[in-house]
Image (cartoon, rainbow, N blue to C red):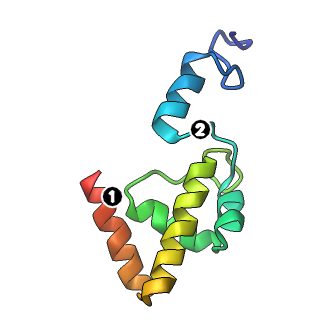
Amino acid sequence: MDDDEGHESRTDPTSTVARLEEQLLGGPRTLSLADVAERAGAGLEEVRLFWHALGLPTVEDEAVAYTEVDAEAVRLLRQAAASYGVSDRTAVSLVRSIGHTT
């Protein structure tokens, strides 16, 4: 289905955009940066730093640009860092290395 501007709707699960988001992002973009931080138990700056370290673009805090999978990834990263007792600096270095290999 097309929206008013002639673009496919992200809300239509059969649209090309929706199918690509499911395949590439693990689901639709439904979360803001604050939502990701809340779900991951992290601060906004921490999520923004991890995102930047991965080499991914950051957007306005209120923009709906993240997925549930993104929030889970941040949560798991924080959990692993806490479990292994690594410093914030080391955690960011590990995130950066992941960003360079993908």
Q: Which mark is residue 76?
A: none
Residue to which mark 2 is pinned: 27
Q: Using the image, determine if residue 72 lies above or below residue 25.
A: below
Determine crowd level at label 1: few under 14, some 14-19, many 20+ residues with C-alpha closer than 10 A.
some
Nearer-the-camera pick, 18 or 64: 18
Q: What element carries label 1?
A: helix
Nearer-the-camera pick, 31 or 19: 19
Q: Where is residue 82 in the image (x, y as percent from the top left)?
A: 51, 84
Q: Using the image, determine if residue 84 lies above or below residue 24.
A: below
Picture quarter containing residue 33?
Answer: bottom right
Does residue 54 appear left or right of residue 13 in this picture? left
Does residue 101 appear left or right of residue 90 in this picture? left
In primary-sequence order, the first of circles 1 and 2 is 2
Does residue 69 appear left or right of residue 49 in this picture? right
Picture quarter containing residue 15?
Answer: top right
Q: Is mark 2 on a helix, strand or loop?
A: loop
Residue to which mark 1 is pinned: 99
Give the Cα separation between the discs numbered 1 and 2: 20 Å
Quarter of the figure with the N terminus: top right
Q: Position of residue 73 (x, y in %)?
A: 52, 60
At x 68%, y 19%, the residue is 9
At x 33%, y 75%, the residue is 93
Q: Position of residue 40 (x, y in %)?
A: 64, 67
Which amino acid, by three-letter code, is at mark 1? Gly
Picture quarter containing residue 27?
Answer: top right
Which amino acid, by three-letter code, is at mark 2? Gly
Looking at the rendered image, the disc whose residue lies closer to the viewer, 1 or 2, is 2
Q: Position of residue 98 (x, y in %)?
A: 32, 61
Determine crowd level at label 2: few under 14, some 14-19, many 20+ residues with C-alpha closer than 10 A.
some
At x 53%, y 76%, the residue is 79
